[in-house]
Amino acid sequence: MKNPFKFKKEIVNEKLFNNDTSLPHSQEYPDEEVIFSVKNFQFYYDNGAKHALKDINLEIFKRKVTAFIGPSGCGKSTLLRCFNRMNDLIDGNKKEGEILYKGTPIDTLNTIQLRSKVGMVFQQPNPFPMSIYNNITYGPKCQGLRNKKELDKIVYESLNDVGLYEEVKEQISHSGTSLSGGQQQRLCIARCIAMSPDIILMDEPTSALDPIATLKIEELIRKLKEKYTIVIVTHNMQQAARISDYTAFFMLGELIEFNKTEDFFAHPKNKKSEDYITGKFS
Amino acid sequence: MKEKNPINFTKLIERNIKNRKYKDGLTNGSTFLFSLLCVVVLCLVIGYVIFTGANYLTPGFITSNYSQSSVALRTSKDFVFDENGYDYSDLERFEDVSYSEKWGIGLQYGKDNNQNNVIYVVQISENSPFNELVRRDDGTNFKIPTDMYLSYITVQTELGTYKTAFSDDGIDNMISTLDSAVSIYDSNFLSLGGGISTSLITTCWLILFTLIFSLPLGIGGAIYLGYYAKDNKVTRIIRSLVDMSSGIPSIIFGLVGAAIFIPFVGSMTGTTGGNIFTGALTMTLILLPTIVKTVEESIKTIPKSMISASLALGASNTETIFKIVLPNSIDGILNAAILGIGRTIGESAALVFALGTFITAAPSFTSGNTTLAVHIWYILAGEYPAYEQACAISIMIFCVVVILSLLTKLINYLFKRKREK
Ligand SMILES: Nc1ncnc2c1ncn2[C@@H]1O[C@H](COP(=O)(O)OP(=O)(O)OP(=O)(O)O)[C@@H](O)[C@H]1O
Ligand SMILES: [Mg+2]
């Protein structure tokens, strides 16, 4: 299954072996539909003092799970937060290059529009201190949805989708913070899909959870893939291998390798990826 | 390497233990002593105030005016006492009321605001000539008000002579004087006076307007500092200004209030001098730093993740502020309101200028007034300081403050319970 394009690339530039991400992956994977494409993207913190993302070129494919892996501090969360422009809130951030959402540069979109299409699930479950019902209707209500019947339907469907409905149907008016950690995280996912987003960004969604709750979330992600595009940051390589279709491996702010997950773990293209997978460094 | 001599801790500790015991005892003892002293002083202050003022804190004191009004009444000039007598059978008899059988009225002792005995006309028979008393000044009929006491009465006796009975001489004397009378030549009814009703109502109005002005401004400032402001030089300068201005003596704000707000409000409404609005604006200045800081602190305790979650769901800043930030800093807002109310009740120096020291007959929005605290200042500043009344007002202020803090606790509790549900 040799890609002629890739072949050509290697001839053109030997260095590309270390940086074979500079060309759009969609040409490597022509079957995939691109949702986000990141082009020559640089990101700096502290007014340019901290170069957190270096010349990233990457594409996120529709209805696929893309896992971001890499050692701590390599910029996974930073890139993730760039997709829904949460980094704009940080003082002294600076970016170059562009990220396109379905072909439109995200900086030209209204953040409210963008974020209602690009949901986010955080590392720590963070339900609002209000009822489960209000947690889920928070986003839709902010967009102006007032119809009680529709809201009820959204609450039911979202809870059902994350497999929480049976567990909490008796306590839908209780505070979201009264649930267990795993339930809270699923509530946060439900809150996110209540907006029917295109993409769900997840930053280590299971790192605060016990193994059983983690398995439930993983199962959920596999199910959600049918409807949504998911980008997940994880420290757990087994998790990446279990749930993702594509894997992006970062190091020191650079994208080292982007590959199909099976290929990435079976025969990584890059030496650094191989070292990372085999645990030579972490 | 040379091996170090190990320190013999057991010995060291033994040697030290006595010394440390003494030191510990000394610290503990002095801490205890100082806290005891504080408690004792506090108890003495509160005890003194309550002991001195409690007797004076009567419903009459709270509901009556500071100025005393009087009315002089007499029987009309053509009144002739009916020798056949009147039918007073409608008069219900009570144990503790003394009755004048001749005039058909019941008299009873009461207290004035200085805790002296005074006489009230508590019952009047339907057929009593007392119903037809007229004012000495304009001759119009006047119904004897229940909140006025009878300070003295001058009657014309059957012999044509005049006889006067004073309230101080007691009810029995008053009744025997009445029983010897054929007409009432003069009677003087006085309202209680010395009361605080106007100051109390003015204080309430002042609190209301102060909160209306200061809370929105203060919460706005707190949202700016706690939510929007970037951590840069300007923010730091604003913050330290806010900190500093909470230490400025209030009399300086009073000065600003008098120099700026009185002409400003005057130019808009045509008032001259201080009034409730200039007072409220001045109090707003005084309270703003406290409100901003209290609310900002409680905004700062809201987890960043909650705000991120809201923004990530596509909520705008305004929605995040109204749905997440404000509801979760409600305790700070309530605390700020309570602090503000407490400060408004207690403030005197600034309000002497900005509101005035005029204890009027009725609260007014357009002219000078006075609050309870300035009332205290006023009655203590005179030639005969009225400590008892001042203490009575202080008790009221204590009570209001205690009730307010209980109220915050209650509201906080209710909010917390609602949130947990
Ligand atoms: N708000 C910030 N201000 C300044 N520097 C930051 C900020 N957030 C992250 N960084 C820096 O940017 C780099 C990338 O951080 P990022 O959080 O994206 O790493 P990460 O890959 O998610 O790491 P981890 O796996 O530990 O979560 C790190 O060196 C970090 O110190
Ligand atoms: Mg991270």
Image (cartoon, coloured by chain):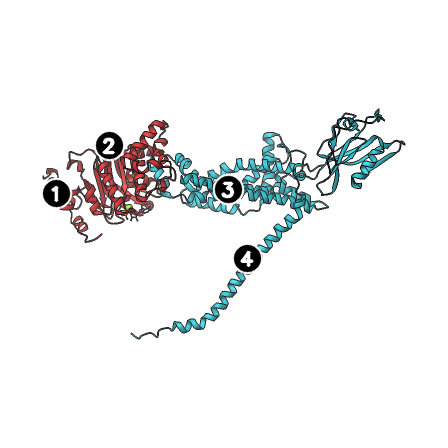
The residue carrying pointer 4 sits among few (fewer than 14), some (14 to 19) or many (20 or more) residues within 10 Å by Cα, namely few
> Which secondary structure, mark 1?
helix
Q: Are marks 3 and 1 in contact (CB under 8 Å)?
A: no
- Amino acid type for the residue under numbered disc 4: Ser
Which residue is denoted by mark 4 in the rendering?
B35
The residue carrying pointer 3 sits among few (fewer than 14), some (14 to 19) or many (20 or more) residues within 10 Å by Cα, namely some
- In which quadrant of the rendered image does the N terminus of chain B lie? bottom left
Q: Is residue B304 left or right of residue A7?
A: right
Q: Nearer the viewer, residue A151 or A251?
A: A151
Q: Residue furthest right?
A: B159
Q: Earlier in the sequence, mark 3 or mark 4?
A: 4
Q: Could one spot residue B329 in this view of the protein?
A: no
> Which secondary structure, mark 4?
helix
Please report, as a chain letter, where disc 1 is located.
A
Q: Colour of chain A?
A: red
Looking at the rendered structure, whether the residues under marks 2 and 3 are on a common chain is answered as no
